[in-house]
Image (cartoon, rainbow, N blue to C red):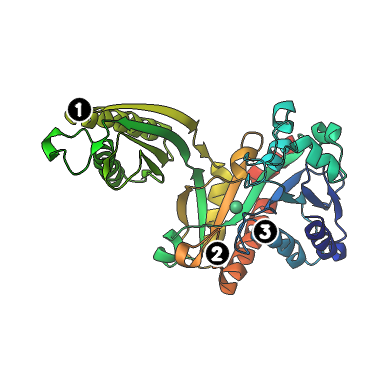
Amino acid sequence: MRDCHQEIARWMEPLRAQVRVDAAGNFRGFYPAARPNAPRLLIGSHLDTVPNAGAYDGILGVVLAVSLLEELHGRRLPFGIEVVGFSEEEGVRFGTPFIGSCALVGRLDRELLDVQDAQGISVRKAIEEFGLNPEEIPQTELENDTLGYLEFHIEQGPVLEKLNLPLAAVEAIAGQSRLEFTFLGRGNHAGTTPMHLRRDAMAGAAQWIGTAERVAQGVPGLIATVGKIEAKPGAANVIAAEARLTLDVRHSSDEIRTRAVTDLIRQAQEIAIRRGLSVRESTLLSQRAVAMDPFLTGEIEQAILKTGYKPHRMVSGAGHDAMILVEKVPTAMIFLRTPGGISHDPAESVAGEDIEKAIQCGLYLLDQLASSPEFQERIRRA
Ligand SMILES: [Zn+2]
């Protein structure tokens, strides 16, 4: 990560930007405005990644931010631009995502600093070992002079490729529910127990998985996934006494999401009753959907239109740093087409022409903001 920071700092040298690494390990590179003390717009994404990753998730958003500044060719805007490369977005090391962006909204608190990795090293200790001072984390918090946050990110899904479009404006990040269901039946001999006398936990779970798929297929934008199942005792010749499975439900409307979850809990109970089973469920996560800033999203649509494409709006099914920044500042996201929808894998890629379109779109956006009465009002108020 240190090498990565140094490399980006080297790119930003000719821009005469002020670079530093903040106390939460985020890279920050500030490109000043035409006038001193003008407010700033943050542009960035995350620098960390997952094991066996691709080359674009996160980092592309930081590279694009630097490219945009290069394309200004020294031109100064009515607002400063701060390039941000977030630390620990994926949550690989500590099992907790968004650590770097949490610092900017004042949520990297004592509890989060005490979270430990597999070796028992806390976030606090890791920050110290990197040569930073956790006591300075409150100073990483965004000041009132922040106009907003803009993030370019690969879509990590197949939608834009299917639509044959290079870019999209993200209007919301989906809310997410994660639950665990356990169907309980009676274990018994697979050879001697007739079909009509079974209380097969696995068969009940399987029926319910089909139901979950059908429910999601019937509601536009609803996503439901059973990604994990575990049967006990787990032998080929034993009827399963217990089947434990996960459910992940996402939608941009919290109401639709929670209604779907309630419906699936009810259907699990009905299936269990019909089959002489019992079922219990527990909620592991219920995260609200977040809307992106309507003004910035509208401006992104205009900018996409100017690059020559239909401005498609979409909901992000994956979480991003933008989801955290939105708590404090107006936030917007631009998605880039992801060939094959493949991400978190070495095969992850982005077309060079799409990156060119993204830079073009970003430049249109910066110019639009610089001349927009609404944004000038925001600059005045900041
Ligand atoms: Zn990412």
Name the residue carrying label 3.
59
- Judge by depth and name the residue closer to the eye, 122 or 301: 122
Q: Quadrant of the N terminus?
A: bottom right
- Judge by depth and name the residue closer to the eye, 38 or 250: 250
Horizontal and vertical percent position of residue 20 = 85, 50
- Judge by depth and name the residue closer to the eye, 305 or 292: 292
Instruction: Please say whether residue 23 is visible from this viewpoint.
Output: no
* First-in-chain label (3 vs 2): 3
* First-in-chain label (1 vs 2): 1
Tag 3–tag 1 contact (CB < 8 Å): no
For numbered disc 2, what is the local secondary structure? helix
Name the residue carrying label 2.
306
- The residue at the point 51 percent across, 47 percent down is 318
Q: Quadrant of the C terminus?
A: top right
- The residue at the point 29 percent across, 48 percent down is 236
Separation of marks 1 and 2 at Cα, in angstroms: 61 Å
